[in-house]
Amino acid sequence: MTESANYDANRWKRFDEWDERSLRLDQFAIEDPENGFSAFSGKKDPKPALKISEGKVISMDGVAAEDFDLIDAFIATYHIEADIAEEAMAIPSSDLARMLVDMNVPRSELTRLARGLTPAKLAETVAQLNAMEIAFAYSKMRARKTPGNQAHVTNAKDDPLQLAADAAIAVALGFDEIETTMRVARNSWSNALACCVGSAVGRAGTLFQCSSEEAEELEIGMAGFTSYAETVSVYGTESAFIDGDDTPWSKAWLAAAYASRGIKMRCTSGAAAELLMGFHEAKSLLYLESRCLCLQRGMGSQGTQNGGIDGAPLAASIPGGVREIMAENLLAVWLDLECASGNDARHSESEMRVAAKVLPFLIGGSDLICSGFGSILKYDNSFNPSSFNGEELEEFLVLQRDFEADGGLTSVEDATALDLRRRAIDALAYVLKDLDLAEITETMKRSVAVASGSNETQTFSARQVALMSEAIQERNITVLDVIRSLHGGGFVQEAQNLLFLVKLRVSGDYLQTSAVVRDGRVLSAINDPNDYTGPGTGYRLSEARRRELAAIRDVLNRDEVLRSEAVNQSIEARAINYRTMGEATPGTDKGEVVVGLSPGFGNKIFRTLAGHRLSDVLRALQDGIRQGGGIMRVVRLNHTADTSFLGLSAARLSGSGVGIGLQSKGTAVIHQKDRLPHMNLELFSNAPITTLEHYEAMGLNATAYAAGDLPEPVVVQTRGEALGARFHARVALIYAIETAMTTDNAAPEELALEFQEQTQ
Amino acid sequence: MTPKTLSANDFPTAETMPGKVTGLRGKSLDTLTLDSALSGELEMEDLRITPDALLRQAEIARSVGRSALAMNFERAAEMTRLPQEEVMKIYELLRPGRARALAELEEAAERLRHDFEAPRLASFVLQAAELYARRGMYRTRY
């Protein structure tokens, strides 16, 4: 290596390293209000204003009624409630902003006022809140008390077997809703049937949607396969709306159409859609979104999928973009809409940015925290990778546990997961065969059951799936055919569960705001309203739910540590014997180095945190001491388990005045008899990364100190591992086992080591 | 005696008034069983929501300050009377550039009013028709 070349670099090397981080794959854009790149202050954002005459809006946010575009006209007609507007618009937006974060102002008062506020006024109000205030206000203002979550269930092959298996897993994880879509449009019917069957495994009531072309989605719903829809997109400028091939009236027509068929529906809108489509009118993300949301309320949509959504990555490229996404979600709930709060389309390649974005919604709760949590692997997500995916699902479970925050999910055990997958696959395979749609081989079933993603499956060809889908549609197969078939195949519970779901549409109870099904009951903003008015109110974890959140897999406990040590015990018994020789006394040999062992060393604990057998550690120390011309004497100290005191006590017993303290977990210290307890000669605190070579070098150095020399200290190099995260739970448990073995005033014991065999 | 207006306490209706909740062919909730599905007695029509059920939901929504949602349920109640093709036909007509002239939407409104007893939907379509004219929506989109 030519060092001089490095010194000539004209850049601090840290920037090269930063360049390599995933964050730097994200693109960032400069603020440019004229060209639509502004989160909160568009060049042409209007000032809030409203004029009403004889109950009719004659101008709104600076536009006279005769100049209204279709969006203005719809909002003025269906959103603005004239009898509230005068009172609401007279309140300064700074006062409204304070009311939003004031726990003493009830939610219902604020939702009432929102019905008289114009888009510009709503936007101007929430723009005054900082990110923390928005998060708090969101938590107070969201409609349903109990939080929930929604999953994406898709795969790259549109494989029905995998869809069924993954749907069953999503249900087991606790998702209230699951959403599928297709790689190939014509596969919508097979996707729908497969997810429908899978979602009936395990429990009843998980709502399901198949995102498809408008007319087809409604037809699939009519056939009873799906129970909700959220693809009714709206936009904040008229040009974008028309470019999306709809108008406020055509979308409102669809909203009524879904309700008329007993199917739950929510609209979709999100920041930066207009910017992506090239029709931003130099207005801010927030103002345009405020228009979208007023429109949705006016249409009589019970809710919205809102918060960036597909525009989230673009919104997040703009300064304040993520705060804006939070702000638009707040507008949604202030307007009394159910909110499936985005956190779906992944806005960043940085895991930190992703986790930071979801946190306010996890701790504050949301009707559906993610409007599409990828329950499948990233490459299998036909919508695009989500913020959280199959890969990161356990991180979400742990975040719930960390913050004792209900993100709607519950852990699934290994064995249960595989059982559920097999059950779903068997059920679907039976239905497909019974309805003469496909033949499924054992290999297909087995490969899909264990596969993490579609890259690993041996299943249908793309052509087979397409034929199956077309047959379902052409033969007018309905959910009733599926129910009968499931029953015929012995899948009685699944048949019951599906019938339960399709019966929901008869009463229409789940058409109300924020409806989900929990424990067989419709839970909505009507019978489970968010009643937050300060600490102790609103949603709180029950003790049972708290325990569920805590129950992640592979949790360490004391018994577990002792059990694994019991296994090591038998191995060590063949390697070393510690013979007790009576009370240890101070030595006189100037060449000796005393090694002081902790109370549990070699009798309760048998390996270091790095996994070294304790016999090997002692052998390494002995080798080092011998290389330095010294003699190792070993004592067990019973009055302490603390490294420093082990070392100091050993030093005081040592004829050379130098001793080594060694804990069973591998932490070691070189000490000298006249030093203060914590002023040791060398400390080896990173036991998990301390190698046998290090122990050997330690032994050698101890002899150098004994000879009055000052050797080069042994350095245990770290690579920045978070050793505390990796080991401290075990450390605390082991240490507690050792401290419990100490006895005040207990005398040190002399040990004779008998190495039984050479170990590698 | 006028029946009392429903409120939040009447929710969920499947639990508070199971006897009144029926499918489109009049079957009550408790008869929509797995056995009836197996025997073929149960059809998709029995699993369709009725105008009454939607109007009940509208009353409940209005009682908790959600009049916009209530109005959607009321439009939906009328729409239960439209066959699927009609629903989609008018949806299509309301999309940009589909209707070439105001008269096409007026004609649809007329049909809604007379053939389907859907006055709310008729006015809704008429309102769109007029605004579309003002916004120059009757243009050809190639």
Image (cartoon, coloured by chain):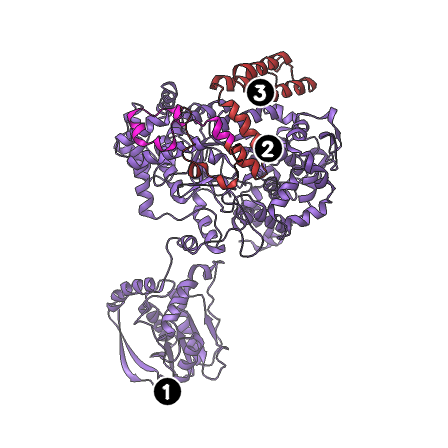
Span shown in magenta:
B26-55
Q: Chain of mark 2?
A: B
Please, what is the three-letter code of the amino acid marked with disc 3? Pro
Instruction: Provide the letter of the chain coloured purple.
Output: A
User: How far from the left and from the top, in percent, is residue B46?
Assistant: 39, 26
Q: Chain of mark 3?
A: B
Q: Is residue B135 above or below residue A57?
A: above
Please, what is the three-letter code of the amino acid marked with disc 1? Pro
Quarter the C terminus of chain A occupies: bottom left
Residue that mark 1 sits on: A586
Q: Are marks 1 and 2 on the same chain?
A: no
User: How far from the left and from the top, in percent, is residue A397?
Assistant: 44, 50
Question: Was residue A393 drawn as part of the magenta stretch in this picture?
Answer: no
Q: Are marks 3 and 2 on the same chain?
A: yes
Marks 1 & 2, CB-CB < 8 Å contact:
no
Quadrant hosting residue A90: top right
